[in-house]
Amino acid sequence: MSISSNVEVLDKRTLIDPVDINTYEKQVGAPFIDSLTGLPNHGFFIMTLDRETKRSERFGSSISVGLINIDCFRLLNKSKGSVEGDRILRKVAECIQNSIRQVDLAARLYGDLFAVIFTESALENAVNAAERIRLNIEKTQNKMVTASIGLSGYPRHTKKPSSLLQEAYAALIKSKTKGKNCISYATETTNKVDTIAPNVLIVDDIPKNLKLLEGMLQPLRYHVLKADSGEAALDIMSKVDVDLVLLDVMMPGLDGFEVCRRIKNDPRLRIVPIILVTALDDSKSKIMGIEAGADDFISKPPNKAELIARTRSLIKLKQINSNLVDIENVLFSLARAVEAKDAYTQGHIERVSNLAMVLGRKLGLNEKELEALKYGGILHDVGKIAVPREILNKLGRLNEEEWEVMKSHSIVGYQICLPLEKNLGPALDVIRYHHEKMDGSGYPDHLKGKDIPVVARIVAVTDIYDAIITDRPYRKGMSRKEAIDILLKEAEDGKLDPEIVQLLVDHLTSK
Ligand SMILES: [Fe+2]
């Protein structure tokens, strides 16, 4: 069943507003279909869920949500290759779509995580559908591929429809920890605190120590997950959203340092705090632990009060960082949505960002500045979200009024990103100043020469270079040679930083 036909059926039952996915795409300026599986993507799912939950709350009707995750997908993908991995994802999507009613909505949220909205459906009915999905996946893949499912339902199992997704996620974690290939559902609302408790992973090869730590953490009412080896810990973390790791150092196989290093080197896991459990006066271990990226240490045998205090404060920190990461993700999605408004600039922000970092390295900039080039390159035009598509894509020259609107994008982008000042740092300078000129004729603040931060001067050059060499609505992309001539002229005329332009020319001509 196609997505649009799904929406049409829902329209007839007046469950979904009379808009189709194409209208959404036009309104938001970004695709809503996952290109790999053909299911709706995360954006469409969230919008639909928001509308459906509000409707359920208003009319008191039932609604359930299911989250479906392929077991050990990362290992499958690694051992069988990404082509087979993609095939599995498509097959699972098909199994889900074939197991639900026409009025339900299935989506691929990201990676190997799928979701279903069971409209006007109590949890008991959703359980039947989930069992069909589980069996279908198991059967079509000859038991080589299985899935874990978490379910939540309103009004019986959660008081607020808006927390359905969170509850389903907690239920999914239960399925994963129960041994996979099974279905769990959110408990009655009286046990709600259990379903949203943070997940603490304790890792030790000695069962007695695991038991001791688990007992000490009991008053906190967290979900405690246990792993008896470094390998098992990494496996759990690949499937479950862990909020804190208590990690023993001395273990056979992967030791605590190596596990710590791998977690901190994984961009998706690096915000998870790690407490290393070390021998009392082992200062060498502490130094090695710091080098591996550990956030804190606890001496063996642990002191209960100390363990609880450190665990609490690091979990709080993780929650704050998670919120910031969410905001960052929203900003980057926004930047890509802006890019999608203009069919001629596909891939522009990544190219600007990458080339700016190449030049930054050649200039010997520090890590913080390089990071500013990376994020600034991606976000520099995010303010164009406020510029109408007709102005962005206008074929002729912009009139004075339109030009003023276009110029506002650097200030608008800066204001959008300002709440993340602590995280973005000098990337904010890139967003605000990437249209300043060395002779003060740029905008928005008419800065001159070295008053323009170096990161903004670099992105100014790479932004213009990429714009020259790519096709535009009004002309074909120019050659590298033509682009170099234009950039050198701009530097000579006092518009661009001549040192940075020369660096780019040297880089391009050395290839
Ligand atoms: Fe710009």
Image (cartoon, rainbow, N blue to C red):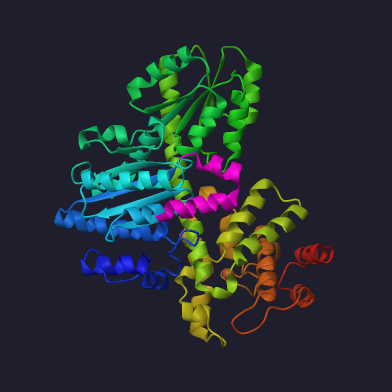
The image quadrant where one finds ligand 1 is bottom right
- Asked if residue 138 is positioned above or below residue 350 in the image, the reply reads above
Residue 258 on image: x %, y %: 63, 28
- Asked if residue 247 is positioned above or below residue 430 in the image, the reply reads above
Q: Is residue 425 visible?
A: no
Q: Where does the magenta region start and end?
A: 71-94
Q: Residue 45 occupies which quadrant of the picture? A: bottom left
Residue 243 on image: x %, y %: 44, 34
149 on left or right of 393: left
Give the quarter of the figure containing the C terminus: bottom right
Front-lying residue, 119 or 469: 119
- What's the residue at 63%, 51% (across, down)? 371
- Magenta stretch encompasses residue 80: yes
Q: Is residue 104 visible?
A: yes
- What's the residue at 53%, 39% (across, down)? 269
Residue 409 on image: x %, y %: 51, 70
Q: Residue 489 occupies which quadrant of the picture? A: bottom right
Does the magenta stretch mainly form a helix, a strand or a loop? helix
Give the quarter of the figure containing the N terminus: bottom left
- What's the residue at 51%, 21% (across, down)? 228
478 on left or right of 350: right
109 on left or right of 186: right
Q: Residue 101 occupies which quadrant of the picture? A: bottom left
- Magenta stretch encompasses residue 216: no
